[in-house]
Amino acid sequence: MRATPVIPLALSVALALAVAAPARAQSAGERPEVTAAAKAVDAKVVAWRRDIHAHPELGNRETRTSALVADHLRALGLEPRTGIATTGVTAVLKGGKPGPRIALRADMDALPVTERADVPFASKVTTTFNGQETGVMHACGHDAHTSVLMGVAEALVAMQDDLPGEVMFIFQPAEEGPPDGEEGGAEEMLAQGIFKDFKPDAVFGMHVFSTLNAGQIGVHAGPTMAASDRFNIVVKGRQTHGSAPWGGIDPVVAAADIIGSAQTIVSRRQNIAKQPVVVSFGAIHGGIRYNIIPDQVEMIGTIRTFDEGMRQAVFSELTTIAEKVAQAHGATAVAQVPDTKGNPVTVNDPALTARMLPSLEKVVGADNVVDPGLTMGAEDFSFYAQQVPGVFFFVGATPEGRDPRTAPSNHSPEFYLDESALDIGVRAMLQVALDYLNDPPRG
């Protein structure tokens, strides 16, 4: 997930805690059991986060992390289901009183990023990814999500006798995408039936966010995070000597023209007054020597949209541009747009968001709940929210006193999490869960 600048609803006051500081005092309106529970698990959550951070694992390879999670759930007296979508874990807590069903989700995977953050528990893990040696790092904060949900599970189990309804805990692999040739992530968790026998009335998730200060929570109703799709375009020409370009067909020039023409999709073809659109080329590969015009050039990139009609239109327009521009150069183009099944737009159910907004405000205060607007980053939480009403919110990660607009972003090798975000995450998830279970929407 990649963040974008925040547009505050009101003046916000960041609240940051030192790593070793005690848990924050109860906020006005916050359930006293939330305050007590968060304080009871605070040290454990920090320890889990640091351990997971020091031992990151890529998507569909989260064996150590999922074992840690499953062992913890068993120790709580739950019966975890393991091995879902390769390394996913779920467990259901049945409260002592009748009530609705909810699901709480955390993702577990790390990124192929070499860590540069100056913390004593920095990752030293390395791997081979796409044929290149690289570090592995929790550069997006999924270590925080996992440890927060472990703490929330422990807190809710302690309340089991008085808890109305049922709670499914979802620990998901491969949010950042499974390895090529594999299935994974939220879509695969659902395909393997996690909502078949337990269909929740609502699903909630959170993400630590570098563009918010610690002590802030961000939430946006309706379309929130963009649909994300990949594309692959191969331009095929005819190889020749660089000194005699007329002796072949130059795919490099054709590829350059395709890239330039593709910019008109956003600037001239889509109504961006309706919803924003992004078409970005991320890599170009072609040729091996300075004086040889190659046979072909490959280009890959990403498309981000918020409207399904616009999404399909961009697919068609980029395909047409690639094929017709290549043809104008005497070349051909094989355009796979998209080249894999992407993530749909993440939509926060408007009614549910309005219903749960006061719960978030009870945790950090109304002035510290902001609207981040549309976020061009993507999240496969979207698949859960297609099945049942969902709310996905952001928890500030950048320390107080540091401008979140210039702080290292999610996915940066210098991404830094103010650990007070862990306390906020636990409180927010508990408050949302308990408020919903005790007073679900009617009608």
Image: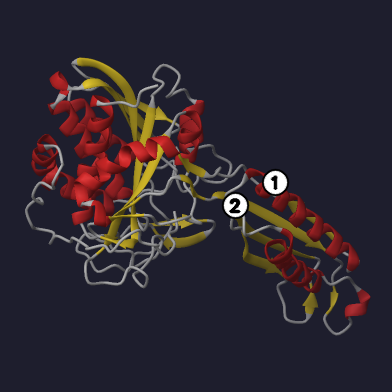
Residue 56: in sight, yes or no?
yes
Q: Position of residue 384 (x, y in %)?
A: 46, 33
Q: Which residue corresponds to mark 2? A: 305
Q: Residues within 10 Å of mark 2 (few under 14, many from 20)?
A: many
Residue 107: in sight, yes or no?
no
Of callouts 1 and 2, the N-terminal one: 2
Q: Position of residue 388 (x, y in %)?
A: 45, 29
Quadrant, the C terminus: top left
Mark 1 residue type: Gln
Q: Which residue corresponds to mark 1? A: 312
Q: Position of residue 109 (x, y in %)?
A: 38, 46
User: Is the image coloured rainbow, by chain, by secondary structure, or in one colour?
Assistant: secondary structure
Camera-side residue of 52 and 388: 388
- Residue at the spot x=84%, y=64% of the render? 325
Q: Secondary structure at mark 2?
A: strand
Relative to residue 2, is residue 304 drawn left or right? right
- Residue at the spot x=63%, y=44% of the render? 308
Camera-side residue of 3 and 438: 438
**Which quarter of the figure has residue 101?**
top left
